[in-house]
Amino acid sequence: MILSPDVILADEPTGNLDWDMSMRLMQLLVELNRSGKTVLIATHDLNLIRATKTIVSARVLRIAGRKLQLAGADL
């Protein structure tokens, strides 16, 4: 973040955080995205995805059966 990258890759950024801290971190990532940064997050936490989708328009993809799929309304 110090060098102000254009793209932020976050691999399980909330993996060891409690729910409140996870949501605070996601809000920070949303704010970075709104400021023009591209943010790519990899996570297994479906509840986090659902909660974040309520505050930002996001493209959600998943890998299943060794194929990349667009996740639909089921998330």
Image (cartoon, rainbow, N blue to C red):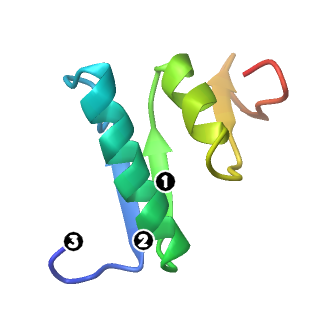
Neighbourhood count class around disc 1 (C-alpha, 10 Å): few under 14, some 14–19, many 20 upward? some
Which residue is disc 2 drawn over?
Answer: 7
Going by the numbered disc 2, the residue's amino acid type is: Val
CA distance separating discs 1 and 3: 14 Å
Residue in the image at 67% along x and 19% along y? 64
Q: Earlier in the sequence, mark 1 or mark 3?
A: 3
Q: Earlier in the sequence, mark 2 or mark 1?
A: 2
Residue nearest the viewer, comparing 66 with 19: 19
Q: Where residue 43 sits in the image (x, y, percent)?
A: 44, 30
Q: Are marks 2 and 1 in contact (CB under 8 Å)?
A: yes
Q: What quarter of the picture does the N terminus occupy?
A: bottom left
Q: Where residue 47 sits in the image (x, y, percent)?
A: 53, 19
Going by the numbered disc 1, the residue's amino acid type is: Leu
Which residue is disc 1 drawn over?
Answer: 40
Please identify the residue farthest to the left as the structure is shown: 2
Neighbourhood count class around disc 2 (C-alpha, 10 Å): few under 14, some 14–19, many 20 upward? some
Which residue is disc 3 drawn over?
Answer: 1
Which picture quadrant has residue 6? bottom left
CA distance separating discs 2 and 3: 10 Å
Numbered disc 3: secondary structure: loop
Going by the numbered disc 3, the residue's amino acid type is: Met
Foreground mark, 2 or 3, reads: 3
